[in-house]
């Protein structure tokens, strides 16, 4: 076993962000002691709390701390308290800022249904089939980062893509597809938008370099319908920033709750990646100890796997989560008739106890 020393920057954020991040840190700490790794956590202000404490959602010390880390774990940001601030100075500006500053142009959102939770999906089992797919969302361009103009009478937002921006994220998606079932669906609005026409042409040209990957193209309106009609057709979806934002919330609903879906945001391989649940700060749930920590926990296991190469450790945690779900323990948002609804803290404790059960110890000692 190779012991790893890793520094993890924590940006718990606002609302339920700190609670769910805390749960993930507890499991990472258990993982480090079971496997002999050293994880050092360094916490920084970010989002609304950073506006209150430092006057800006992304303080320079936070950015420096992230740059100096091996990976970043983020909770969630925002809330009604900061909604009346001028456009561009809200917590969300910190999130877009950190994506830009850390060069995070790839956003991976795995839509994996947990076996014990298939009944909480709003889709009937026969439609759901063996759905398990990944959305690769471009994260540094598009209408998100084009010029925004706003005055009392008129507003505009510029959607822009260059070939280089499309290629770098598409290559990642082709590689992902290659390591999975070998199918890539590129989603655009090439029947209307110039930026989407370039997107489609670029993905089509690149496909020649990946003859082992089959590619299809869907318009975003059709794709949003296909996700509900026949989700099992998808393996990897690659799309622009705006469409990826929207489709990933829709796809998360298939898994039963947006609270279950993690994400990875990354740029160059030698730079720290950022992991965060895709849910928001859920202000109405904050401080009540009821939020589902699984989006944050799966973000942590994604970090173990993708940034640290710790596959066995990642599976050790995910298997314990699946066993606890199979025993019927749930937070309120993923409860179903007959399940035991527990608070976030108790749910996390159940997972921790499961980690330390005999079978988990065997997994920890097993080959890697
Ligand atoms: C997400 C969020 C962000 C986005 C918001 C909070 C700026 O919805 O990460 O999906 O639109 O990218
Ligand atoms: Mn979103």
Image: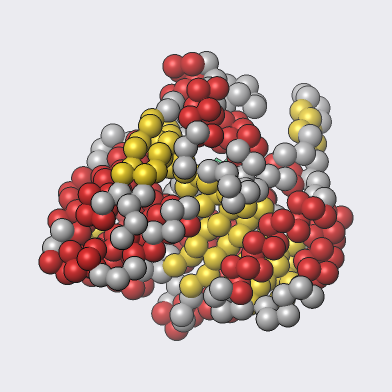
Q: Residue 176: image x %, image y %?
A: 59, 68
**Residue 91 in sight:** no
Q: Answer above or below: position of 23 versus 50.
A: below
Q: Residue at x 78, y 24 (%)?
A: 151
Question: Which residue sits at x=67%, y=78%?
Answer: 213
Q: In the image, is 52 to the left or to the right of 235?
A: left
Quadrant including the N terminus? bottom left
The answer to whether 271 appears left or right of 278 in the picture is: right
Q: Give the residue displayed 80% in from the left and 41% down from the top.
A: 158
Nearer to us in this view, 167 or 154: 167
- Front residue of this view, candidates 119 and 213: 213
Q: Position of residue 266 (x, y in %)?
A: 58, 49
Left or right relative to 49: residue 199: right
Residue 158, visible in the rendered structure? yes
Q: Quadrant of the C terminus?
A: bottom left
Position in image of residue 163 (x %, y %): 82, 55
Quadrant in the rendering for residue 331: bottom left
Q: Residue furthest bottom?
A: 126
Q: Position of residue 232 (x, y in %)?
A: 53, 78
**88 lies above or below 244:** above
Ligand 1 image-quadrant field: top right
């Amino acid at each position: 076993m190779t012991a790893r020393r890793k520094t993890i920057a924590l940006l718990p954020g606002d609302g339920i962000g700190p609670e769910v991040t805390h749960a993930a840190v507890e499991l990472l700490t258990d993982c480090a002691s079971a496997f002999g790794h050293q994880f050092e956590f360094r916490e920084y202000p970010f989002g609304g709390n950073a506006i209150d404490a430092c006057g800006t959602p992304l303080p320079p010390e936070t950015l420096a701390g992230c740059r100096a880390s091996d990976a970043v774990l983020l909770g969630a940001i925002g809330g009604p308290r900061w909604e009346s601030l001028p456009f561009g100075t809200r917590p969300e500006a910190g999130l877009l800022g950190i994506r830009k500053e850390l060069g995070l142009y790839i956003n991976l959102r795995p839509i994996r249904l947990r076996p014990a939770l298939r009944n909480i999906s709003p889709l009937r089992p026969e439609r759901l089939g063996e759905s398990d797919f990944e959305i690769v969302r471009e994260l540094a361009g598009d209408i998100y980062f084009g010029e925004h103009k706003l005055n009392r009478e008129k507003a505009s937002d510029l959607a822009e893509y260059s070939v280089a921006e499309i290629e770098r994220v598409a290559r990642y998606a082709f590689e992902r597809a290659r390591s999975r079932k070998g199918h890539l669906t590129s989603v655009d609005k090439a029947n209307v938008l110039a930026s989407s026409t370039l997107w489609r042409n670029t993905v089509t040209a690149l496909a020649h370099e990946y003859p082992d990957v089959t590619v299809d193209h869907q318009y975003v309106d059709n794709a949003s319908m296909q996700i509900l009609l026949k989700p099992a057709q998808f393996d990897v979806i690659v799309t622009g920033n705006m469409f990826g934002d929207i489709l990933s919330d829709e796809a998360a609903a298939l898994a039963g709750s947006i609270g279950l879906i993690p994400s990875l945001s990354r740029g160059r391989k030698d730079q720290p990646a950022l992991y965060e649940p895709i849910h928001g700060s859920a202000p109405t749930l904050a401080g009540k100890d009821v939020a589902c920590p699984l989006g944050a926990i799966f973000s942590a296991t994604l970090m173990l796997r993708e940034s640290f190469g710790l596959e066995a450790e990642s599976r050790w945690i995910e298997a314990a989560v699946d066993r606890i779900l199979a025993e019927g323990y749930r937070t309120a948002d993923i409860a179903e008739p007959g399940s035991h609804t527990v608070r976030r803290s108790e749910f996390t404790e159940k997972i921790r106890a499961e980690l330390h059960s005999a079978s988990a110890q065997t997994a920890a000692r097993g080959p890697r």
